[in-house]
Image (cartoon, rainbow, N blue to C red):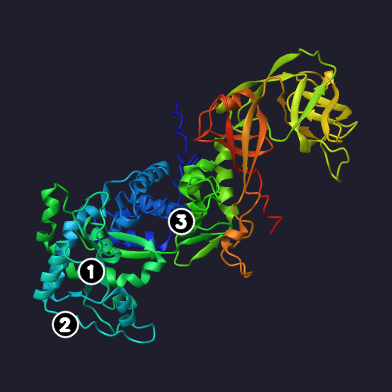
Amino acid sequence: MSATPPPSVTENPIVAPPARQDFIRQIVRDDLASGKHDAIKTRFPPEPNGYLHLGHAKAICLNFGLSGEFGGACNLRLDDTNPAKEDPEYAAAIQQDVRWLGFDWHELRHASDYFEVFYLAAEKLIRQGDAFVCDLSAEQIREYRGTLTEPGRPSPFRERSAEDSLALFRRMRAGEFADGSHTLRARIDMASGNINMRDPALYRIKQVAHQNTGDAWPIYPMYDFAHALSDAIEGITHSLCTLEFEDHRPLYDWCVDKVDLAHSPELLAPLAARGLPLEASKPRQIEFSRFNLNYTVMSKRKLAALVQAGLVDGWDDPRMPTLQGIRRRGYTPASLRLFAERLGVSKQNSLIDFSVLEGCLREDLDAAAARRMAVVEPLRLVITNLDAGHEESLRFPNHPKDESFGSRDVPFSGELWIEREDFAEVPPKGFKRLVPGGEVRLRGAGIFRCDEVVKDSDGVVVELRGELDPESRPGMEGANRKIKGTIHWVSARHAVAAEIRLYDRLFSVADPDDTGDGKTYQDHLNPESRRIVTGYVEPSAAEVAPEQALQFERLGYFVADRRDYSPGAPVFNRSVTLRDTWASKA
């Protein structure tokens, strides 16, 4: 008797997801294949001078995602070289946002960790003749720099000797000079076609206390110098940044090459003394495109102005494009990672429609959010053929597509709340919900016929009365009787009152920065971007934890507000509608 042959491995093959393809990943693959690097190392280096926004989410996903894909490491480095604008509050929020997105760093570093190394590197440049102390004011330096079509003029202090510059630089370090009186500048090429190479500043005097180093430093390195050397110090292999830094790349390479940390161990001695690893290497800067999102602005300055003017309720206002704001709105880490993936990586800046972001959230929550019933604009419905004290429980699945979510009991009684828009006294063409004398299916409960419309003294409909067909109840023979409309409901006796915040896009025009009408972006704030109503939710919806996402059936996706929600006084934010409601407005 022959043995039963094993099942063919082709019957249910496990197919690995296709490797993601873009020009950065191809560079990494080539570098690893050639042996240039044994492993890759990236970094995400925000300045702690504000809250991260959606643009940063793309950079976070790219840097951390790339290192994860190729078995490398990614540092979080806080670029804290401008203490006048930085705050520990922002630094803490940055770390929280990165972890919330689902990433963790290999090491947490600060540019201020390397202040002593930067200083020693600057002294080396002076001794090599590659830097000098300049006495020109900031305004004079701009005048000497030239234009895109005219070369710059050399500073009268450009030929200052290395000895004199070194002495002055040490006095700058000692705090002997006033802010703006001296700068340390690179000696490169005042005729360069790239203005960034026209003897750029490397250090400036700024007698401001630093959140990490206190009053130890009255001078601070400029961004281009500190950023390039920080990458080199940490052994970063691929330094990823947005396209506006492409013109800075020659200066980046100049700083790395002239200081040559990989062959200057004496400059790294301060780190060795503190027990920090010595990983210096020559990094490669690679630029990728940033993206713009319509119906919003992502300039820190403009967002700060909205906060300061009280036009939004702080940096975590759910209408803000900050990560703190959209998290409170109900956006999930998975939806933002999906958004970053769909944006892709290219060299071409792009304008992304807001609907792409909303679509990513819908896609995630369609699978991940349990269903509940809620009424936002309540209208009372009385079932006259049920006893006044009638109560029962109806069983509903928590998710129509996933049995693993289980089910729940929903209380039902003779008095319900339904959505006001589910009734029309004079129905428009194609209306399939409740009308006077008409029938509608109450979700999971049976078919209701509207026999009476009750109005108040102003003629506003306040109550509908009618009968529930007993043969249409669950399990009865007429339960499947065809009826055109089905609506949701909550039991008026059992429902929990909830504050429901109906959020929408912050601006009413696609490009609030450029409408050509002489108005500013603040003039185009959407007056309907937030509407607060008191609605009713079924009891189980009032028992969720803050930040729990739910689909309110037929209404949209909502989240329990992470700050204001409590079981006794639930507050829900609308994250996104079930369908794109803006397509018809365009």
Front-most of 13 and 178? 178
Amino acid type of disc 3?
A: Gly
Q: Residues within 10 Å of mark 1 (few under 14, many from 20)?
A: many
Whether residue 261 can be seen here = no
The residue type indicated by label 2 comes to: Glu
Measured as percent of width and height from the top left, residue 329 is found at: 54, 42
Q: Nearer the viewer's eye, disc 2 or disc 1? A: 2
Residue 138: x %, y % from top left: 30, 73
Look at mark 1 in the image and give the residue it sits on: 255
What residue sits 47% from the left and 42% below the top?
Answer: 13
Residues under numbered marks 3 and 1 in contact, where contact means CB atoms less than 8 Å apart: no
For the residue labelled by badge 1, is the local secondary structure a helix, a strand or a loop? Answer: helix
Look at the picture and state if 534 lies above or below 74: above
Return the residue at label 3.
55
Name the element at disc 2: loop
Q: CA distance from mark 3 to mark 2?
A: 43 Å
Q: Which mark is residue 159?
A: 2
Residue at 86% from the left image edge and 45% from the top image edge: 428
Residue 568 appearing in the image: yes
Q: Which amino acid, by three-letter code, is at mark 1?
A: Cys
Q: Label 3, secondary structure: give it.
A: helix
The Cα atoms of the two marked residues, 2 and 1, are separated by 20 Å
Figure quadrant of the C terminus? bottom right
Work out whether 465 lies above or below 13: above
Across and down, in percent, residue 247 comes to 36, 72
The one of 251 and 516 positioned closer to us in this rendering: 516
Q: Position of residue 490 (x, y in %)?
A: 70, 26
